[in-house]
Amino acid sequence: MSFIHIAFALILLLAIAAGLFRILAGPTAADRMMAAQLFGTCGVAIMLLLAEGMESPVLLDIALVFAILAAMATITFVRRAWHSSENVGEMNENT
Amino acid sequence: MRILNDIGLLFIGIGMLFFISGTIGLLRFPDIYTRLHAMTKADNVGLGLLVLGLSCQADSWQTVARLIFIWILVLIASSASCHLVARSALQKNIQPWSRP
Amino acid sequence: MTDNILAAFDLVLITTLLLLAWKLLSCEDIFTAVVLFISFGLLMALAWVRMRAPDVALAEAALGAGLTGPLLLAALRRMERIRKYERRLDLDEERNDYKKPKKKQAPPL
């Protein structure tokens, strides 16, 4: 158990809780998605710090899974979801 | 060994500063491009310094190899998705913010 | 000392999870709900780690945060496409209704 690592993990968790505001109030869809990606990176960092702080190296594997699957949501968003959701807004503005 | 531990803590602290500034940039910046700029710094440099600090404190070479592998994966993922989002935002004619 | 900071970590984690779940359920925009669901899966994996169940956390990280998010985004795209397709169907029906009387009226003349 190491105090300083868990304290750093707590700071990162507070940063996630602050970034929640950007997801709720983001003007465009891309802002929300990129905030979710920052959450993913912060989650990886918290996992690494907890693996040192709780002395269980298994958590490195969970961080590895997070890192592998981090880009999936954003790439799917750019390829599939962004076009349609922005078009709906433009159509509402035009009509 | 003791001084290596302290150097690791210093690196982790600097990386934490990058994460906090990335979150503040996400909250305060006016545009999608500037937010992308702030966020990718948190992804690459912040996590890189964190991995550097943790690998100064690590016990074995296998842990260091796993940490660096995680960092390289996050680097590929974040730079690829940042490039995709910025390029398709330009293609959708979202204008960059300029000082009024 | 360490137990205190762990308790503070758990408290912040539980509060953020509850806030996230409330916002997720009371959200009107579907896309925002999907993004909130992705971050909910991530924080839920952290909660499983704190409950000392790393195997469940691994499954939650792979399924909840990694795979369900892209699946929901693709489903959202397909839903909107179906909605547009229905709108086009309506337009075609109106057009057919508009054309049919002409064709029917043409033969008697």
Image (cartoon, helix red, strand yellow):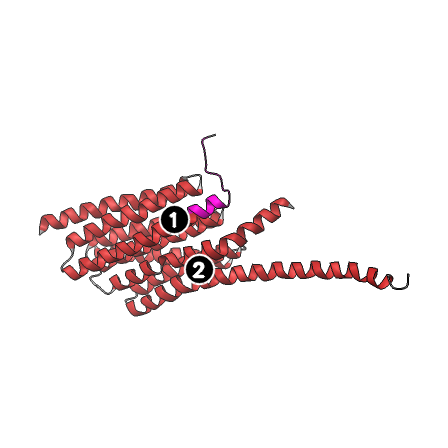
Residue drawn at x 9%, y 50% is B2
Q: Is residue B88 magenta?
A: yes
Q: How many marks?
A: 2
Residue type at mark 1?
Answer: Cys
Q: CA distance from mark 2 to mark 1?
A: 21 Å
The reply to whether the C-beta atoms of the residues labelled 2 and 1 are less than 8 Å apart is no
Question: Mark 2, mark 1: which one is toward the viewer?
Answer: 1
Q: Which residues are magenta?
A: B86-99
Q: Foreground residue, C101 or B71?
A: C101
Q: Quadrant of residue B22?
A: top left
Other residues around mark 1 within 10 Å, as few (<14) / some (14–19) / many (≥20): many
Can residue A22 be seen here? Answer: no
Say which residue label 2 marks: C37
Q: Position of residue C58 (x, y in %)?
A: 32, 66
Quadrant where the image shows the C terminus of chain C: bottom right
SS at mark 1 in the image: helix
Q: Is residue C46 left or right of residue C72?
A: left
Q: Position of residue C94 (x, y in %)?
A: 74, 59
Can residue C76 be seen here? Answer: yes
Q: Position of residue C78 (x, y in %)?
A: 54, 62
Residue drawn at x 27%, y 46% is B45
**Which mark, by number, is residue B82?**
1
Q: Is residue B30 magenta?
A: no
Q: Position of residue C85 (x, y in %)?
A: 62, 61
**Which mark, by number, is residue A47?**
none
